[in-house]
Image (cartoon, rainbow, N blue to C red):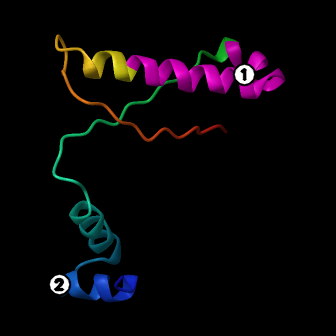
Amino acid sequence: SVPPNTLLESVKEPGQPLKEMWAIQQEEQLLPVPYFHVVFTLPHELNGLCMHNPRFMYGLLLEAGWHTLNSFGSSPKWLGARTAATIVLHTP
């Protein structure tokens, strides 16, 4: 593994901001396959339930999200793909 600073120096061009260099590095690490960024949200009205039983509610959200992605993604009518996902729960 190459230290991060070495990677940044290897792609650096004169006058190129560090943030832009970081973005270039990240793009170079992507697999050469199409991907989608999908966000599932809950209506504000369910916040109370989430506060009282977060494990159940967020588990249900993640399970429903995966079921939806897998159903549409694997269906020949839509993508007909072999699906995979990285799922992250983000709460305020």
In this image, 46 relative to 63: left or right? Answer: right
In this image, 39 relative to 9: left or right? Answer: right
Q: Quadrant of residue 42?
A: top right
Q: Is residue 71 visible?
A: yes
Outermost residue, right side: 52
Identified at 25% across, 39% down, the residue is 35
In this image, 44 relative to 19: left or right? Answer: right
Q: Position of residue 64 (x, y in %)?
A: 51, 18
- The residue that mark 1 highlights is 56
Label 2 neighbourhood size at 10 Å, few (<14), some (14-19), many (20+)? few
Q: Nearer the viewer, residue 49 or 34?
A: 34
In the rendered image, residue 33 lying in the magenta stretch gets the answer no
Q: Amino acid at mark 1?
A: Phe
Chief secondary structure of the magenta span?
helix
Task: Say which mark, if any, is on residue 13.
Answer: 2
Q: Secondary structure at mark 1?
A: helix
